[in-house]
Image: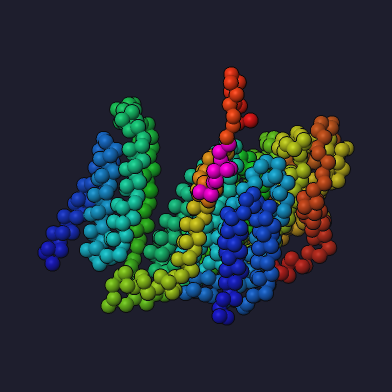
Amino acid sequence: MENINIILPEIFLFLGTCTALMVGVFFKNSYNIVIKFTYLILLFSIISIFLSSVETSEFFLMSFVRDPFADFFKSLILISCFFVLLTSQQFIKDQKILKFEYPIIILLSILGMFFMVSSNDLILFYLGLELQSLSLYVLAAIDRNNLRSSEAGIKYFVLSALSSGLLLYGCSLLYGFTGSTNFDLIQNELITKNTGAVFAMVFILVGLAFKVSAVPFHMWTPDVYEGSPTSITNFFAVVPKIAGIAVIIRFMGKPFDNILIEWQSIMIFLSIASMILGAVAAIGQNNIKRLMAYSSIGHIGYALAGISTGTVSGYSSTVIYITIYIVMNLGAFGCIYLMRKDGLYKEQISDLSGLSKKQPLLAVSFLIIFFSLAGIPPLGGFFAKFYVFMSVIESEMYALAIIGLLTTVISAFYYIRVIKIIYFDDAKNNFDENKNFNINLTVFLSCVILLGFLIYPSILNNTVQSLF
Amino acid sequence: MIAHTIFFYFFSFIAIFSALMVITSRSTINSVFFLILDFISIGCLFIMVGAEFLGMILLIVYVGAVAVLFLFVVMMLNVAQQKQSWFIGKKSTHIPSGLIVGVLIFLELLVVIGGWKYKEGIASSSSIIINKDISNTHQLGNVMYTDYILYFQLSGIILLLSMIGAIVLTYRKRENLKRQNYFTQISREKSSSIEIKKVEFDKGVKIDD
């Protein structure tokens, strides 16, 4: 029975989800009950992670691993998901997507992410990934009366199924060439030269790059972000990225640790391509959701730059980067929810013009979050980029660092353009007065963290250092 | 031993022949039937190498469920119309480019597999202990609910999710649907369902007001 501590958060989450499903089925118009229940499940899951925290241990034929790294990412997933749900309530009510299955599918996708983050075995990893992405397909198409949402769902389904196929092919090749599905055993096998396993690594990396939308596997991102309801876009931009980055670090740090030379060049290419495309393609966008899509591609590029060093300091800089990225994105989407006029949600950047005269507080939030996204010095986003480039320079990868800095400057253009529209253009729209406590709280917390990171950077740094 | 060889060639020949027929036959229905034949002969090959569980699963799942589903889909579609434009219409321009990509990937795979050396004792790095005395199905049963219970449960959760997803995306709640309610139907009384009215001459009775 002591062993059950290791997998307690997963068991709790699943049982909670099943109970919520039953509640949803047997009560009429049960969305409100189920969503409150979901908050409770998320909160208690975090508590169960802390209560049951154990030393690094492996379970189920060494396939399930519980270590501080997994615990950190699981807590991050739960917290960010909590805030995503909290901010999106008003939107869901306005758009009438009040289906009780909505929070339940989100909970199931989180369960899949838990197993991805904790996996120490190809089979468990793949099952977790499938559980997660199957939920995401349904979520993208959940507003089925909306043509664009259905289109986004189909597009994501077809492309993601293809990438899952590639990934599975890579897994089977890896099993064939190393004789094991366990990460530790694969790592030991790869000490000797193994061309087939390198081939498998490429396929697996392609699949993973697709899941975190790194260039050149990013094609689905702008369309899916624009087409799905904003609440789903918010979820897509935040939660699956955490799990994706965690899994990439896990793969590169454990089974592929001994073939660093082979994957490093691929990772550098993915990183540079994502940074450049994220910076250049976002310039011409008029829709703020598309802008956020390209912005997320660019940010994933910076996160991958940290991984591509292949060192512990690089990995921890990526973890810090992705944490701050999530804080910024939660705040940014909170602001996007507030672009609401007569119950309709605006998505054009030009709708923001002259916001500072009507709603100075919202304008200041936009200012802080977008400056942070651009990486302007005193804010959190700057430190995230700073740590990544420090570790890149420590590994003497100067070309990557220089290209990264250049793309930061280019991408600052479109972030600052939004701010210019808010502060210096003529007033156009009167957004509804905002009385939504949940969104205000999230945006406020996000701004406070971004501003306060300067004072106490060591809290996050020390936590992340202790993970590896 | 010679019977074994004869059976092997017999089944492999049928498998390759029917696989070719699947992609070349003009009628879609015939294609599906050849696909079923292909599955059956591959299943027989599996049984011949001692993987009886895999062979049976292939028969049950692919022939019993998937191929029959294909047949249904094919019969639902209007195949006669589509066949015309598909085969007899203008030639597809995708074939050369697809062929080039296919050949390139095939050559790349050849390079990789050409460099493949069988490792000494390939099975030993696996963490599973294989007992050669008991059958496949028995072995699977031994580990399915013990060592691999997590995978098994997780696959179950995936199936649950796919069910929820299918319902979310297709179920439509219809308004004004008259459903049966046995309790109210049976417990109706004469007093509550019949009303006797006196009909006056040349005026009639107003119903349903």
What is the span of residues highlighted in magenta in the rendered image? B186-195
Q: Quadrant of residue A117?
A: bottom right
Counting from the top left corner in percent of width and height, residue B121 is at 34, 74
Counting from the top left corner in percent of width and height, residue A85 is at 69, 53
Q: Is residue B72 above or below residue A381?
A: above
Was residue B193 drawn as part of the magenta stretch in this picture? yes
Counting from the top left corner in percent of width and height, residue A48 is at 66, 71
Was residue A345 drawn as part of the magenta stretch in this picture? no
Q: Quadrant of the N terminus of chain B?
A: bottom left
Query: Quick check: A401 left or right of A255?
Result: right
Counting from the top left corner in percent of width and height, residue B104 is at 37, 46
Decide if residue A371 is in sight here.
no
Quick one: A406 or A117, which is closer to the camera? A117
* Residue projecting furthest to the top: B202
Q: Quadrant of residue B139?
A: bottom left
Decide if residue B157 is in sight here.
yes
Q: How many marks?
A: 0
* Residue projecting furthest to the bottom: A2
Residue drawn at (82%, 46%) of the image: A435
Which coloring applies here?
rainbow
Residue drawn at (30%, 70%) of the image: B136
Query: Quick check: B60 left or right of A433?
Result: left
Q: Is residue B100 above or below residue A268?
A: above
Q: Is residue A439 above or below residue A41?
A: above
Quick one: A85 or B177, which is closer to the camera? B177
Residue drawn at (24%, 65%) of the image: B49
Q: Quadrant of the C terminus of chain B?
A: top right
Residue drawn at (30%, 52%) of the image: B63
